[in-house]
Amino acid sequence: MKKTILEDFHINIKIKLAFLWASVTFLYLYGDYFELYVPGKTAGIIDGNSLLNNPQKLFLASLLLAIPSLMVGLSVFLKPLINKWLNIVFGFLFTAIMLLIAFTSFSEWRSFYILYAIIESILTSIIVWKAFNWPKQTDLQETSK
């Protein structure tokens, strides 16, 4: 009996990182959307009694959450060395943030938030790992000596 082997192809590290950041971004969006269903959340937003209750906090949160979205494109377009280090630094930062959120969100209504935070921390850990182990290119002149 003949064994069937499915075809696969090599995916560039930049594309892998971009897709990982895209997945993280979607999870942030879903988490924030589903949080609107937590009792009292929309009332707190309307009356100004929320975590982002002033322009400075809102700006800082916007700046922080712009990073994963920007990393989708930057992971494709930046040169390898700066790309590698930005992915390591921001991947580590967001892993730490997500783990902090996971450990401080214990409540019946926020179990979805813990789930997303754990998944996001796994994805950002993979980003750090992939970036840290960025494939090396062998110098053709060195190999011909």
Image: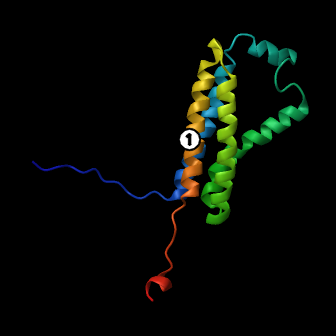
Decide if residue 133 is on the left or right side of residue 35: left
The residue at the far left in this view is: 1
x then y, percent, for residue 96: 68, 39
Question: In the rendered image, which residue does mark 1 sit on?
Answer: 123
In the figure, residue 24 lies in which quadrant?
top right
Instruction: Look at the numbered disc 1 and give the secondary structure of its residue.
Output: helix
Q: Is residue 69 visible?
A: no
* Residue visible at 62% across and 31% down in the picture: 117
Residue found farthest to the top: 39
**Quarter holding residue 32:** top right
* Between 38 and 114, the one nearer to me in the picture: 114
Marks counted in the figure total 1
Q: Quadrant of the C terminus?
A: bottom left
The image shows residue 9, relative to residue 110, as above or below, that is below
Rendered view: 49 above or below 130: above
Of residue 59 and residue 85, the one placed in the foreground of this image is: 85
Tell me residue 141's x, y (percent).
49, 85
Percent coordinates x, y for residue 75 in the rendering: 62, 55
- Which one is in front, 32 or 131? 131
Residue furthest out toward the bottom:
145
Residue drawn at x 68%, y 41% is: 94
Q: Residue at x 68, y 29 (%)?
A: 101
Q: What is the quadrant of residue 21 in the picture?
A: top right
Within 10 Å of disc 1 (Cα), the crowding (few <14, some 14-19, many 20+) is many
Q: Position of residue 13 (x, y in %)?
A: 52, 57
For badge 1, the amino acid type reads Leu
